[in-house]
Image (cartoon, rainbow, N blue to C red):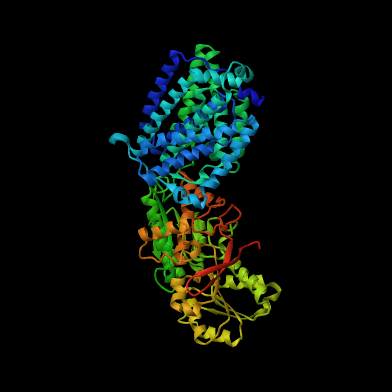
Amino acid sequence: MKISSMLTPPNPSRASPKFFVFAFIVIVLATILPFLLSAYQTFQLTQVLIYAIALLGLNLLTGYSGQISLGHGAFFAIGAYVTAILINHSSVPYWATPPFAAVLCLAAGSLFALPALRLANLYLSLTTFALAVALPQLLKHPRFEPWTGGSQGIVLQKPDPLFGLPVSQDIGLYFFTLGITASLFLLAHNLLRGRIGLALTALRDHPVAAASLGINIARYKTIIFGLSAMYTGIAGGLSALVVQFIAPDSFTLFLSLSFLIGIIIGGLSTLTGAIYGAFFIQFIPNLTGQISRAAPWMLYGILLIACTYAMPKGIAGFVNAAFIQTSPRRRLLAGFFGAGLIATLVITPPLALPSEKNYDTGASSSEIKIGNTMPYSGTGSAWSTIGKTEAAYFRMINDRGGVHGRKITFISLDDGYSPPKTVEATRRLLEEDRVLLMFGSLGTAPNLAVRKYLNAKKVPQLFISSGSHHWNDPNHYPWTMGLQTAYRTEAKIYASHILKNTPHARIGVLYQNDDYGKDYLAGLREGLGLHSHLIVAALSYENTDATIDSQIIELQSARAEVFLNAAGAKFAAQAIRKAAAIGWRPVHYLNHPASSISSVLLPAGLEKSMGIISSMDTKDPGSPAWRDDPAILAWFAFMHAYYPEGNPYDSYNVYAYNAAQILVQVLTQAGDLLTRENILRQAANLQNFSPTLLLPSITVNTSATDYAPLESAQLMRFDGKNWVLFGEVFNSDD
């Protein structure tokens, strides 16, 4: 089958009274359906209506005028962002946003069409392709971040039904969308029956003859491109209302390709083809993923090929042929077949296999329960602010409507930085509080204490607040994942700097006697390589020790000229203070987890901390370099509103803010399939995600074989007031 044959289907005939009878029956059924479906199924059906609008817009362009666009996902994004910004920044009621999205996308489409339509079809396709690729990056640009939310996106609250109707919010949104869908289909029907439709048909099938008859080709192509963009923009705005979350990564090139697939499979140059195509792109990818978890997209591709060969004119062409060219009995059977197929897609929840379900313990249609352990007491209490910041962030997310409408319940228990208490607290969280997953629990030893238990239970242990190498072991512990740059990687960065600047210096190390400290020592030795003999003393301490004064005195006695301080917050501050007290002034490298100004350097003495070198992967709120950065401004606003007692300059709080953003991204990607398996799958599928307070050159990436989300850092030096970045960003591969 030639592609050109699919792009030039027969001209549509004028509507007969049967069309209106059919339309009336469809509207009646569409009105009844939401009262027979669950909230989730109503959400799915609303998504079908939204996709139908978008596909109708693209069909006007491709099916009726013969122009191919690979970038309509960009207009979908514009409509979504216009709607979200109007609601969030201007308090425009949701029901008033579609006209704004329509006008802006009509204008944007028309302006884009003026130069683009001078190109031949293939070059036009490449131009729209470029638009689809460029717009998500533009939405992430810092200049627009106050409006677009950057990579973090915008969260919307689910609106209440119009006129105070006594129905659920989902049903209210469904009827709102249904009314707009019906109006836009009627508008398209009338346009295609009039002068514009006839002109488009002539331009598509006989462009030379049309030009000789005086039809203004550029004018009509510009009009239809603008109308097509308008339809798609309205759909994007409705999608923002229904999904309640938008981000640049929601509008990738794949979205544009899905629209093109939808109109081809549904049927070009037909109004009903947009509806059939909408059902296809809404349900079929989910179906293939449920049938084959190993290779869902392979199955999807096979299905596309099969549909193309079996129905070269799309589903609409197949149905029309069944009704026009067959006996009344076969027409009736075809009608029942089509109705049964749609009923199966919509009413069966959602085509799940017998063992499938949308929620695991800890998740529901309204709530996601997340567990956490944190040392709110004991020697690690300086880090407890991490848990408080994460709790504050989730409160903000809840105030903005939650994640896909679900509120986050964050249950954080004190473990005193004691592994036995961690085990007790974790078991309570799973067996009594029944959380969906564990997130951000602090410490190497405490998390090692529960790693096996959580993996046996197949409970995600995500984004641990520790840089141990243990968390990147998907083969043996597939349910456990860290977050921050590994301690060993950080130590290698220091080793590289030492060899470059003080290649013959004697090195002394203070480290905590557990995996946390030992990872730093191992990384330093690996980084020094053949020069590891430069380490003249490596002294440990126990977390239960009162002081480390004797270790500092011994390191001075070893005549160490370089000091790697791989201690926890309390002991790191003691080491800084004691070194100054005894007059020992080596080149001082301080591990990142202990680099907080308020929790470590201030207690130790800012003047005693001058010149200390550490590493960082986040923006420093106190640095003049970020004073006007939109993300930093948003950060201060967040701290003022949700954690006023916290210190906005504390690096621990900045870390927690980023960590919480990453988890919300995972939950967003998980959509409505909130099983522990899918949560883990999404956590292992983060692609170039940029939490707003990460350094611009650093992104979060994971895969099924790489559980190290962050693997980069940059050196910084304390100047007595702030940390000052210097040098280049180091990656784990450097």
**What percent of the width, then of the height, locates residue 159?**
35, 41
So how many labels did they put on this image? 0
> Which quadrant would residue 702 be assigned to in this image?
bottom right
Q: Is residue 673 above or below residue 620?
A: above
**What percent of the width, then of the height, locates residue 106?**
48, 33
Q: Nearer the viewer, residue 118 or 396?
A: 118
**What percent of the width, then of the height, locates residue 242?**
41, 39
Q: Is residue 142 above or below residue 487?
A: above
Q: Nearer the viewer, residue 586 or 463?
A: 586
Residue found at x 60% / y 40%: 130
Which quarter of the rendering shows the C terminus? bottom right
Residue found at x 49% / y 73%: 568
Left or right of residue 30: residue 625:
right
Q: Nearer the viewer, residue 476 or 533?
A: 533
Residue found at x 40% / y 27%: 30
Residue furthest to the top in view is 327
Q: Nearer the viewer, residue 106 or 638?
A: 106
Residue furthest to the right in view is 530
Q: Residue 299: tell me if it is visible.
A: no
Q: Residue 118: tell me if it is visible.
A: yes
Q: Is residue 672 above or below residue 186?
A: below
Which quarter of the rendering shows the N terminus? top right
> Which quadrant would residue 218 be assigned to in this image?
top right
Left or right of residue 507: residue 340:
left
**What percent of the width, then of the height, locates residue 97?**
39, 37
Q: Is residue 578 above or below residue 234?
A: below
